């Protein structure tokens, strides 16, 4: 490497950035695509709504477009260390995209089990282009994960779902980054919850850095589910979860205990948002802050709007963590996946273009109409 090409956080990935806090050794081959070190974007408009400081952790800027890359660099690196040939996962689309990409880089085979017909277009294309074998099962994500657990018992496959503890280890690095950037943990952390690996991972990361004295407080964790797919909110598994946010269409979260623990230990809560609120929040975030996220990732924004209506008047429920923090509190929202993952669902924002003759006069006339 030329001397001028100094290594930065951005080109080395989360294992190199946080090696001392992760279960890797010199014998672990690091399979990385430069994941992590994602922007923590201050949102003036959301801050005005809460009366505090709101930041958006933009995880859609990871190499395959979602936070799953943080966990997958760990899971695939450890699978490589253990000599695995084939990795297997169930997925609502983002885990499979990440598994396929990192497996390709490691020279491994990858098989993904997806709920037939319920994967966003961009995610489906990713599985194929990275060279995975795609199996569409006639069932939902929970059925696919049940099959993965069963197939994993044979020892023929390395399972890279978040039931693999290395995934959680990698994903906790997002909490580390937030603490390093803010100089402390936020007061409240809001994120979408599906299979519940991520809320489990963030809570682990926040606790580890607090124990090491790198932060002086712990955030209250607010886990957001879609109203039609809200087993943790209701406290019972669901058989037929349904939501436009297909990423979090999960009725039997694998990290159930981790999610309950994060919320109860931190003094947070679970919240639900309707599909209509998710789509409105997706449009709001893109058109007001320039951040385009997939529907599941808009759920935390929708939840914030639910806690504070647009004029700043509070509409909080009894268990709302906003009741327990000072005005001016720091809030971080994780937006987990890029908007381009699911262009079809974003078509709610698309109208027919203004079509004109190819002359400046015609264009000027068309633009005059919009004021
Ligand atoms: C954009 O890809 O479960 O609560 O198989 O893709 O850790 O499951 C995706 C989950 C939030 C929920 N946002 O995270 C999968 C999968 C996006 C996601 C979640 C997912 P977890």
Image (tube, rainbow, N blue to C red):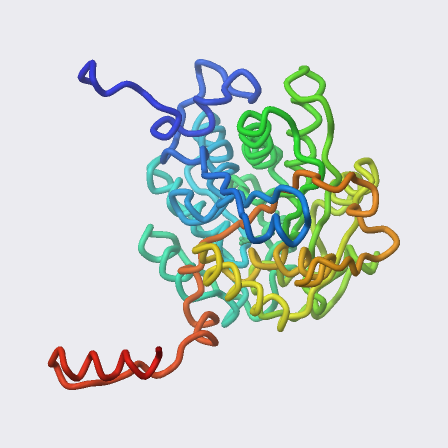
Q: Where is residue 156 in the image (x, y as percent from the top left)?
A: 51, 42
Which residue appears farthest toward the right when viewing the image?
318
Q: Position of residue 271 (x, y in %)?
A: 75, 57
Point out the image quarter for the N terminus. Answer: top left
Q: In this view, does 254 lie to the left or right of 97?
A: right
Residues 340 and 54: in front is 54
Dividing the picture into quadrants, the one containing residue 122 is bottom left
Point out the image quarter for the C terminus. Answer: bottom left
Q: Position of residue 154 (x, y in %)?
A: 58, 43
Residues 203 and 48: in front is 48
Dividing the picture into quadrants, the one containing residue 301 is bottom right
Q: Please name the residue shown 58% across and 46% down the image.
A: 334
Which residue appears farthest toward the left when viewing the image?
359
- Seen in the picture, residue 115 relative to 198 is either above or below; the reply is below
Q: Where is residue 165 in the image (x, y as percent from the top left)?
A: 62, 34
Q: Please name the residue shown 73% across and 30% down the image.
A: 218
Q: Please name the residue shown 43% across and 56% down the image.
A: 290
- Seen in the picture, residue 265 relative to 140 is either above or below; the reply is above
Picture mark count: 0
Residues 114 and 83: in front is 114
Q: In this view, does 256 lie to the left or right of 151?
A: right
- Seen in the picture, residue 291 relative to 75 is either above or below; the reply is below
Q: Please name the residue shown 71% across and 45% down the image.
A: 255
Q: In this view, does 342 lie to the left or right of 251?
A: left
């Amino acid at each position: 490497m030329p001397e001028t090409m100094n290594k930065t956080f951005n080109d080395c990935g989360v294992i190199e950035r946080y090696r001392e806090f992760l279960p890797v050794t010199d014998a672990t081959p690091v399979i990385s695509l430069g994941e992590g070190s994602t922007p923590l974007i201050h949102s003036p408009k959301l801050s005005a709504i809460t009366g505090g400081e709101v930041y958006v952790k933009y995880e859609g800027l990871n190499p395959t477009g979602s936070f799953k890359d943080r966990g997958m660099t760990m899971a695939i690196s450890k699978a490589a260390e253990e000599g695995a040939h084939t990795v297997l996962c169930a997925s609502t689309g983002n885990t499979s995209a990440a598994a396929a990409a990192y497996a390709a880089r490691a020279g491994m085979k990858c098989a993904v089990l997806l709920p037939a017909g319920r994967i966003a277009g961009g995610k489906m294309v990713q599985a194929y282009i990275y060279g995975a074998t795609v199996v569409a099962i006639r069932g939902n994500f929970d059925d696919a994960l049940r099959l993965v657990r069963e197939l994993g018992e044979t020892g023929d496959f390395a399972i890279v779902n978040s039931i693999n503890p290395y995934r959680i280890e990698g994903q906790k690095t997002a909490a580390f980054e937030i603490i390093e950037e803010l100089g402390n943990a936020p007061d409240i952390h809001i994120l979408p919850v599906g299979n519940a690996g991520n809320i489990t991972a963030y809570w682990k990361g926040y606790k580890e850095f607090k124990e090491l004295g790198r932060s002086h407080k712990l955030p209250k964790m607010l886990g957001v589910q879609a109203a039609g797919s809200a087993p943790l909110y209701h406290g019972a598994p669901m058989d037929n979860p349904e939501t436009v946010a297909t990423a979090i269409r999960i009725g039997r979260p694998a990290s159930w205990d981790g999610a309950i623990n994060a919320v109860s230990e931190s003094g947070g809560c679970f919240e639900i948002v309707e599909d209509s609120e998710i789509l409105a929040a997706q449009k709001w975030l893109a058109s007001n802050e320039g951040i385009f996220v997939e529907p599941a990732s808009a759920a935390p924004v929708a939840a914030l709007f639910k806690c504070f209506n647009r004029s700043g008047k509070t509409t909080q429920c009894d268990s709302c963590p906003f009741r327990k923090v000072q005005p001016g509190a720091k809030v971080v929202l994780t937006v987990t996946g890029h908007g381009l993952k699911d262009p079809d669902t974003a078509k709610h924002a698309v109208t027919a273009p203004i079509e004109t003759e190819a002359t400046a006069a015609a264009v000027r006339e068309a633009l005059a109409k919009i004021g």
